[in-house]
Amino acid sequence: MSTQEPQALNRNERRKQKTKENLRNAAIKTFLEVGYLNTTVQDIMERADLGYGTFYQYYKSKQDIVIELADETKEIIKKDYVPSWEIETDIYKRVVSRLKTIFDAYAKHRDVLRILLQCHHSDEELHRAWNQLMEVPYKALKKDLTWSMDQGICRDVDLNTALVALNGMIQTIGIHILQNNLTEQEIERVTKDVGMLLTKAMFIKEEFPIEVWRKK
């Protein structure tokens, strides 16, 4: 079955798209420079070099911009979160691969996450957006850890306690990446260190038994 190519945007639609992109970029730069709470709609429009009224053709408030950015980022992270370690039986390598995906997401989406980090406690909707983003790696961690415990390759600890502790550590490292602008090499080193800590703390074997792996 052939699929039709999406129709090209007409001139008016391209103009609107460009205006919205300009507005969003201006908002991101202003939030990062002066802070979300200190930013006004007027500040955004002056940076975008657009009329004040143009803002309300696209958004109801500056909060709407952040929520839109957060929702888009969440969907991108979910899509990118495809396990690359399915054939990997070495537990340490598998853990490092999983962590690398998480920490790379913090670096890749640094601007949006830094904005959310500074403002997510300011109101309920922004806090919801932040929590939903943070749930993406948490759900993956829960799935992995639950399966590993069921197979008897983890230490005999309470699952919920382990999830809270490990998720807290991962979020703390992620925030460290955001606040200190870690380089790719620094993130690589941090990932290996955290992977070693997690592997030693949680697992009692170095590899998944091949018969267990084949049943997975």
Image: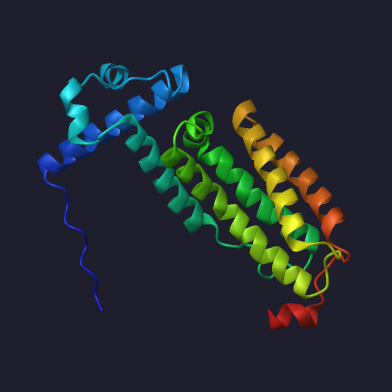
The quadrant the N terminus occupies is bottom left
Q: Is residue 195 above or below residue 18?
A: below
Q: Residue at x 46, y 18 (%)?
A: 33
Rendered image coloring scheme:
rainbow
On the picture, is 126 further left or further right than 54?
right
The residue under the point 82% across, 56% down is 199
Find the residue positioned furthest to the front. Answer: 124
Task: Judge whether residue 85 can be spotted in this image.
Answer: no
Q: How many labels does the image show?
A: 0
Q: In the rendered image, which quarter is residue 55 located in?
A: top left
Query: Residue 205's quadrant in the figure?
Result: bottom right
In the image, is 87 to the left or to the right of 46?
right
Percent of width and height locating residue 52: 19, 21
At 33% from the left edge and 37% from the top edge, which residue is drawn?
64
Which of 147/208 is in front?
147
The residue located at (50%, 50%) in the rendering is: 132
Foreground residue among 185 and 144: 144
Residue 114 position in % (x across, y down) = 52, 31
Residue 196, x across and y down, in percent: 82, 50
Q: Quarter of the image for the C terminus: give it.
A: bottom right
Picture quarter containing residue 50?
top left
The reply, left or right, for residue 34 in relation to residue 205 is: left
Asked if residue 115 shows in the view, the reply is yes
Residue 37 versus residue 163 in the image, above or below? above
Judge left or right: residue 157 versus residue 124: right
Q: Which of 88 and 165 is in front in this view?
A: 165
